Image: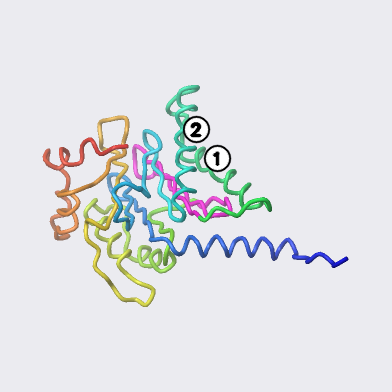
Amino acid sequence: MSTPFYVSPQQAMADRAEYARKGIARGRSVVVLQYADGIVFVAENPSRALHKVSEIYDRIAFAAVGKYNEFENLRIGGVRYADLRGYTYDRDDVTARGLANVYAQTLGTIFSSAAEKPYEVELIVAEVGSAPEEDQIYRLPHDGSIVDEHGSVAVGGNSDQIGSYLDQRHRDDMSLGEALRLAVESLSRDNNGGERSLTAEQLEVAVLDRTRPQQRKFKRVLGRRLSRLLEEEAGDSGAAGKGSGDEEESGGDEE
């Protein structure tokens, strides 16, 4: 009888982590930044049907990179959790921290299970508060750990390089236009330090806007308004999105 091949638990977990990281790194990056009036999500995603950024609840949004079928299952589960908790208790009881804990348990259980492969996903759960200091951003890697982020965060692709670029240039008091252009600049940089051009058609952009009078703060930024924000000069960015025409262009794009 042959002797079974032995792999130490430490090596097995390291191999699973490396497998998941390689799968995540193949995906295009997503960046999330705080700005003066809320939180903006920017993803390199030419598809208009397969979203990387989605609404979960009134003030909560979700962004992900990796395998679409895996993070879409997690998104749907998060929506069901939020709806059930809000209906059973109160809408204010649905929080980003609670949702992040649910995702962490799910990802951690899958990662430590020898019966199935780890999920090749990395998530961001964000909640906009009534003031900037109340904003919450949580990053959840493949192993189910939770990282409390502030200011800006990047996942997927060359996220380390993008994150360093954002850390050096991000300010909490940025307008939406300034934050959006910084996000696109960071996504345009490749691993060798070069730059490429990203157009509005290659981007998926959404915001959690604390100034919206509606209970739901999530809004997608599309079409002419997105193009205009990308083309504005820095000195004019403070006036972005204030006209009624801009609101009409983005209205009805909520999920």
Q: Nearer the viewer, residue 32 or 113?
A: 113
Percent across and percent down for residue 33 are 34, 53
In the displayed structure image, the side of residue 142 where residue 194 appears, left or right:
left
Q: Nearer the viewer, residue 172 or 246?
A: 246
Residue sitting at x 39%, y 44%? 135
How many residues crowd mark 1 within 10 Å: few (<14), some (14–19), many (20+)? some
Residue 131 on the magenta span? yes
Q: Secondary structure at mark 2?
A: helix
Percent across and percent down for residue 68 are 44, 51
Residue sitting at x 43%, y 58%? 155
Q: Quadrant of the C terminus?
A: top left
Q: Which residue is mark 2?
A: 81
How many residues crowd mark 2 within 10 Å: few (<14), some (14–19), many (20+)? some
Q: Which residue is mark 1?
A: 102
Name of the residue lying farthest toward the front: 1
Q: Which image quadrant for residue 252?
A: top left
Residue 233 on the magenta span? no
Q: Amino acid at mark 2?
A: Tyr
Residue stretch in magenta:
121-147
- The CA distance from mark 1 to mark 2 is 9 Å
Circle 1/circle 2 CB separation < 8 Å: yes
The mark found on residue 250 in the picture is none
Q: Which image quadrant for residue 38?
A: top left
Q: Amino acid at mark 1?
A: Val
Q: Image height check: is 201 above or below 212?
A: below
Q: Image height check: is 183 above or below 214?
A: below
Q: Image height check: is 21 above or below 92?
A: below
Percent across and percent down for residue 29 are 38, 60
Could you tell which of marks 1 and 2 lies nearer the N-terminus?
A: 2
